[in-house]
Image (tube, grey):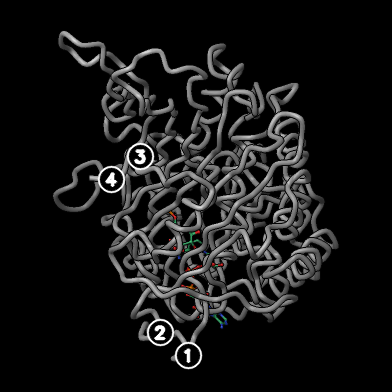
Amino acid sequence: MNQTKAQKEPAVIVIFGASGDLTRRKLVPALHSLACEGQFPEQTAVIGMARSPMTDESFRENLYGGVFEYSRLLPGREGICALWPDFASRISYLAGSYDQEEAYRQLGKRLVDWAAKSGVGDNCIFYLATPPELFPIIIDQIGCTGLNKGVTGWRRIIIEKPFGRDFASARRLNEQIHDVFDENQVYRIDHYLGKETVQNILTFRFANAIFEPLWNRNFVDHIQINVAESIGVEHRGGYYDNAGAVRDMLQNHLLQLLSLMTMEPPAAYNAKALRDEKMKVLQTIAPLCCEDALLGQYSGYRDEPGVAGDSQTPTLVAAKALVQNWRWQGVPIYLRTGKKLTQKATEIILQFKSVPHLLFPESVDLTANHISICIQPDEGIHLGFETKLPGTVMKTTPVDMTFHYGDQFGERAIPDAYERLIMDTLQGDPSLFARSDEIESAWTIVEPLLGEKEEPMTVHPYEPGTWGPQATEDFITRDGREWHYSCSKE
Ligand code: NDP
Ligand code: BG6
């Protein structure tokens, strides 16, 4: 996000956990789409590392299935992608144990060979796509074998989420990382920040003069951040049962959205200024309080593979946050996320206050204005306002003014979040990655809901395919407000 981006330099992208789901479904399809667009610098290579025995060939075959299914771009969709053979020739596999030095020595040798062959610096991105328990082990081995420092090029590390499971573990992980890498080498991923529609929050707010003057307590009644998913835990039951909705979604994705919505304008368009402002606003949010939060679990969750039969892990969370600063004093921010809900819909609503005086006697129930920032799958922005109902009486009705990315820019114009984030890492721009202090602050905010220091909260059951337990509705109606479904409800 720096005004002038650094040159895209060739690099080796080493993926740890390369036999896993994320690599096949997200990372390699993203890399492939970038290659199809010619965005990759020449000679960029990928080395997958994991324990499973595989040859380069069988590794590529496994990846191609994922590319074919998930890649945004696939020239020659009918059979094999025309560009795959060239891209595949740059992919190789290294089998080895994450805790054994020998594997890292072999990796080091491959990096040296690559640099000699390609004639460029030995630039390398380490991508940690393993279960999080392995992060410290891998980082430690990278440090012990000296791979954290290039001989002629740079070294960077991308770390997947979850980043810790509470404040203390996140801090410990930050310390472990900082023993081996400088903060400017570290890219902590939150893929929501890579979404085009999320980045557009900044553009919408700070590239337009008409919205920002309204963006405060004088005009805004409340904000809602809704991240509804229709899928359940899928094949990730083991991981999810240990995490739950607070750790999996609220601590990271929803709080990142909240910070972009509520932060002050950064003084400059660069990583430091942006992350400083996000950090400032996170520091003004008091830890969430259990009385102002609610947990739910969908029926059938306990039968999912990898989930305990008596699990109390929440698959839904709703909470009220307060940003305690001059701009937002008294404006509640309702956060809600859940799995197996009616439909997938991520949207942010800025709900304005009602008009101060009712002028039209026929319209006593005027709908207050709102702006919906629709993140997915309806990617766009809606502005809700009142208009005169055609006819002989002066009666009003709410209408919707919309902007849709697909209509404006074409259906395949939006890059996948991982494409953007990998490209930013290659260019050394950490703007769309969470800094160590942001992560720690976010954990402080959600910690009361983790049930580890305080009494565990009640977990309300709900039926799959609904909008959650009735308590979720009561949670907001008791404040005289209601959940919005403008881009999502059929
Ligand atoms: P997987 O569970 O598929 O694990 C990745 C690889 O790590 C496996 O293929 C396996 O490779 C190795 N591995 C798994 N368990 C162990 C273990 N106990 N000990 C040693 N090695 C193990 O993970 P995902 O690919 O789903 O996710 C990777 C990371 O990305 C995680 O941190 C996850 O939280 C994060 N993430 C994943 C998302 C997704 O949609 N999948 C979404 C957002 C984040 P091998 O046995 O060959 O070594
Ligand atoms: C991941 C969570 O970070 O985000 C998943 O671990 C969740 O549980 C996913 O399904 C949602 O991402 P998206 O991009 O589909 O909204």
**Residue type at the position of mark 2:** Arg
Of callouts 4 and 2, the N-terminal one: 2
Question: Residue at 59% across / 46% down in the picture?
Answer: 11
Relative image position of residue 369 (x, y in whole percent): 43, 25
Question: Residue at 30% across / 22% down in the picture?
Answer: 408
**From this viewpoint, which residue is outermost toward the bottom?**
309
Work out whether 389 lies above or below 145. Answer: above
Look at the numbered discs 4 and 1 and tell me whether their residues touch, using CB distance below 8 Å. Answer: no
Tell me the residue that label 3 is attached to: 36
Indicate left or right for 237 with 161 as reference.
left
Indicate left or right for 179 with 415 as reference.
right
Tell me the residue that label 4 is attached to: 489
**Residue type at the position of mark 3:** Cys
Q: Secondary structure at mark 2?
A: helix
Work out whether 467 lies above or below 240. Answer: above
Relative image position of residue 153 (x, y in whole percent): 72, 45
Picture quarter with the N terminus: top right
**Residue type at the position of mark 4:** Lys
Q: Write down the quadrant of residue 193 in the picture.
A: top right
Q: Residues within 10 Å of mark 3 (few under 14, many from 20)?
A: some
Q: Secondary structure at mark 1?
A: loop
Q: Residues within 10 Å of mark 1 (few under 14, many from 20)?
A: few
Query: Of discs 3 and 4, which sits in the foreground?
Result: 4
Look at the numbered discs 2 and 1 and tell me whether their residues touch, using CB distance below 8 Å. Answer: yes
Question: Whole-Å distance between the Cαs marked 2 and 1?
Answer: 7 Å
Question: Whole-Å distance between the Cαs marked 3 and 1?
Answer: 47 Å
Tell me the residue that label 2 is attached to: 302
Query: Of discs 3 and 2, which sits in the foreground?
Result: 2
